[in-house]
Amino acid sequence: MSDTSDRLLAETTSERRALCQVAPGLTFMKIESTLQDGRTRYVRALTVDFASFTGKIRATEGETVMDREKTSAMAELMASQGLKPLAAVNGGFFDIASTFSPGALGGLTVVDGKVLNSASNGESALALGNHGTNLWIDKVWSQSKITFTPPGGNPSRPDHVLDGLNREPGRIQGCGGGFGPAGVNDRNANAKNLIDPRMPQVGIHCLDSEETILFTEEFGALPFLAGTVRAVLIGVDRTVKRVSDTTDGMVAAPGEHVVVATGSHAEWLKADAVIGSTMSLPAAAVQRGASAETPVHFPGADDATVNGGPRLVKNGSVGPFDFSGSTTPQYAYLAPRNARTAAGITAGRELVLVVVDKKSGPKDAAHGLTMAQLAEAMKNLGAADAINLDGGGSSTMWVKGAVVNHPSDGVGEERRVGNAIVITAK
């Protein structure tokens, strides 16, 4: 038993567990631990046993990528789409401070088999596809390029690297690379704020005044973006239909795209993407592994991923979490006790989703868990692999029509978040 586990158990004087079946193969558990100081730690857990569960695990960003919505509302939206939501938890990190796209996710997001957000290269992600057969946690990388061919001619220039997908140009949540070369993180602006400028960081963002971003129909209408900008609307037939020096009013209808470039990239787009030009956009290449060594495909409509980090448990071992002497923003989030959301995969390939409350729940509630304690808690719940998801005020669990934890984004308030993991009956 690790020192962290010893400390976690040493805080506890008694523990009460209550288990109920939400549906065949889906169980909900309440864990309430009385601590030595008299407070109570509130933990809620969902377990999906794919051997008997006949429903589906879905990721959703709500009605549009750019907006935020409550976890409960995202679950209930699926009911209006003819599905039967059973349970849900909040998902990955999103750019809460962006005024351009406050719901945009900070890493790889796949919904219904479609990549909607690029990876912060080197980040961790949770894959949920194909009824548990495509269930994994790993570092992920993504890359994509576009080319514009003039009417009746050859491409005027080589392929152009896309920096991101469905997010604010110039603002990189988590500071990871975007659609750059596999295994390379080229987003090192504000490097002085990073622990390791080559890797993505939780809780901060980087700036880049020269980017090219692709927007899909799922984003919604683009807001105004200041500075040197070029925006082009790409029709269903992949030809340029409209060009503009502003993003205001640009929106991609079903099957369409909008490309936005800033800084020197805007000059490239102005020169190459003229009315009638044809855009070539190969599918985004996604890799997983420490060195982006394994290609990843999302062939089915059920495939989904959510971003997260850090990795909590890997092959049954709790990762090292050394925060001594650190004052950087991401450590300020990782080190202290906080409300937490996490996902784990057991050795038997079950999915475990966990939410831990913070002090703004009941008056006797404990102050959440540190990241190291969360990792140990996930291991104690049977996770052989586990990942931290967005926590703090975002941490929410919803089961069959009701929020079952105590969200900490204000007293009793549920935060509007970027995405959610929703378990449905079909």
Image (cartoon, grey):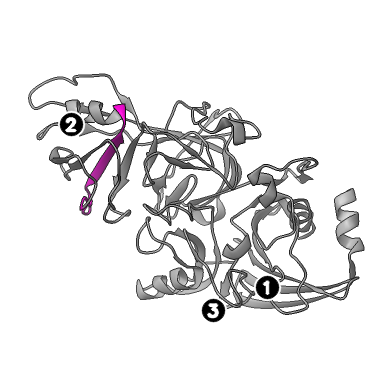
Q: Nearer the viewer, mark 2 or mark 3?
A: 2
Closer to the camera in the image, 17 or 206: 206
Q: Give yes or no for residue 262 being in the magenta stretch.
A: yes
**Element type at mark 2:** loop
Of the residues shown, which amino acid type is indicated by label 2? Ala
Label 1: how many Cα within 10 Å (few below 14, some 14–19, many 20+): many
Which residue is labeled 3 in the image? 400
Closer to the camera in the image, 144 or 178: 178
Label 3: how many Cα within 10 Å (few below 14, some 14–19, many 20+): some
Q: Nearer the viewer, mark 1 or mark 3?
A: 1
Q: CA distance from mark 1 to mark 3?
A: 23 Å
Residue 192 position in % (x across, y down) = 60, 31
Q: Quadrant of residue 404?
A: bottom right
Residue 69 position in % (x across, y down) = 44, 66
Closer to the camera in the image, 363 or 11: 363
Dot placed on the residue nearer the N-terminal end, 1 or 3:
1
**Element type at mark 1:** loop
Q: CA distance from mark 2 to mark 3?
A: 49 Å
Name which residue lies at 19% across and 26% down: 272
Which residue is labeled 2 in the image? 273
**Element type at mark 3:** loop
State the mark number for residue 360. Answer: 1
Label 2: how many Cα within 10 Å (few below 14, some 14–19, many 20+): many
Q: Give yes or no for residue 354 being in the magenta stretch.
A: no
Please indicate whether residue 224 sits to the left or right of residue 32 in the image. left
Closer to the camera in the image, 60 or 249: 249
